[in-house]
Image (cartoon, grey):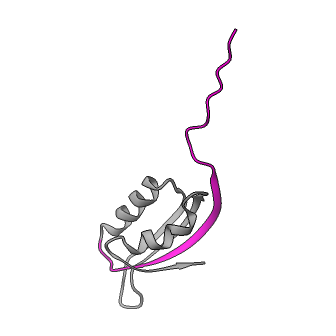
Amino acid sequence: MTAIVQSPSFAPIGRERRLSLETTGDADVLLRVLVLLRRRGFAVRACEFRASDRHAPARLDLCVESPMRAGSQLGAWLMNVVGVVGVAEQ
């Protein structure tokens, strides 16, 4: 009998990161950010979107687990998303 060992099809998960994104308030920015994270292999653990009002701009709070290979580039990728104005790591 022969045993075949398959390697896992997912990348090893790195550390958990909490991010706060300031947005323009565009309705599509939430979808754009989540698609970017999914395509780059990030695991989204929590997501909270607050629409803008007269007291504060629109904000998106995220908790993600970054893959070991791409964690350092996350801020730059998010700043390139249309509708994202600022990225801060908590």
The percent position of residue 19, horizontal first and vertical second, equals 54, 73
Q: Residue at x 63, y 49 (%)?
A: 12
3 left or right, relative to 54: right
Residue 9 in which image quadrant: top right
Vertical relation: 51 (above or below) 48: below
Nearer to the camera, 31 or 88: 88
Question: The C terminus is located in which quarter?
Answer: bottom right
Q: Nearer the viewer, residue 57 or 16?
A: 16
Image position of 37 with respect to 59: above or below: above
* Relative image position of residue 39 (x, y in whole percent): 43, 53
Q: Nearer the viewer, residue 6 or 29?
A: 6
Question: Which segment is the magenta one?
Answer: 1-26
Q: Quadrant of residue 15?
A: bottom right
Q: Residue at x 54, y 61 (%)?
A: 70
- In the image, is residue 82 above or below residue 1? below
* Picture coordinates of residue 30, whole percent (x, y): 38, 66
Residue 27, given in percent of the width and then of the height, sits at 30, 69
> Residue at left 62%, top 53%?
13
Determine the residue located farthest toward the top in the rendered image: 1
Q: Is 36 within the magenta?
A: no
| Residue 14 included in the magenta stretch of the image | yes
User: Which residue occupies 37% across, 82% down?
Assistant: 52
